[in-house]
Amino acid sequence: MSSALTVFVAALLTAAATGLGALPFSLTRAVRPEAVAWANALASGLMLGASFGLVAAGSEIGTVATLAGAGLGVVFILVMDRWLRHHDVPFGRARGAGARRMLLMVAVMTAHSFSEGVAVGVSFGGGASLATAITLAIAVHNVPEGLAISAVLRPQGVTVLGCALWSVLSSLPQPVMALPAFLFVEAFRPVLPWGLGFAAGAMVFMVLVELLPEAYGQTQPRVVALLVSLSLVGMVLLQQHL
């Protein structure tokens, strides 16, 4: 039987793995407009690929709940976007549209982490082998999620360390939710498809409304489509082999 401390530490390690996604951005200092578009395209593909995996996992537990959760995720983005447009909230040195996009990204990924934390906790309730597989899978696919966050934050002037810290911060709900989900497995299991659907709907909507329109406006559409396609397929394949 897994101990509560083991569950918490395992989920904390999955959150820490998100910070590794910022490392590629330590290789470059200047960020050109084309690079911003490439970064947005890369983030879009990774988020869409992750969303497909979330929907697939959620539908195995409850199709209707997953679909309803996705609708709630879209509503969440619409409400938050509307609020941010009427309140000039700064994010670091950025203001206006740049700050709004960064806040939306961090908020979406944080919401996504709640469902991942529940998944880790529930998996520990199913035995050590299942728990190990799920924990490793989430830790590995948290790295490209950190890359997606950094791809949006770094072009807006956030430091590499800042990107890593925001990435880890967005994943802290994982250890927070893993512990109660482990202690009350049967109570949390029905909530899981709602959380998975919510995260998927929020990510897809943000990609279509925020990231891709900006990317298409800053570089050649074929380049954007290529990067989105490759990163999307890569994320799907990564999830299939974990």
Image (tube, rainbow, N blue to C red):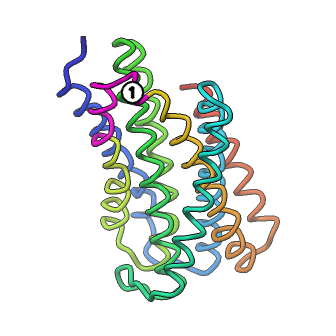
Residue 186 falls within the magenta-colored stretch? yes
- Please give the count of numbered marks on the rendered protein: 1
* Residue 22 rendering spot, x and y as whole percentages: 41, 58
* Residue 104 rendering spot, x and y as whole percentages: 50, 68
Name the secondary structure under disc 1.
helix
Q: Main secondary structure of the magenta part?
A: helix
* Residue 110 rendering spot, x and y as whole percentages: 42, 55
* Residue 23 rendering spot, x and y as whole percentages: 39, 56
Position of residue 118 relative to residue 43, above or below, is above
Three-letter amino acid code of the residue under disc 1: Ala
- Residue name at image x 67 percent, y 36 percent: 64
Position of residue 239 relative to residue 131, above or below, is below
Determine which residue is flagged by label 1.
187
Q: Nearer the viewer, residue 51 or 40?
A: 51
The magenta segment: 175-188
Q: Nearer the viewer, residue 131 or 25?
A: 131
- Residue name at image x 74 percent, y 79 percent: 217
- Residue name at image x 34 percent, y 80 percent: 92
Residue 173 falls within the magenta-colored stretch? no
Position of residue 71 relative to residue 128, above or below, is below
Quadrant hosting residue 58: top right
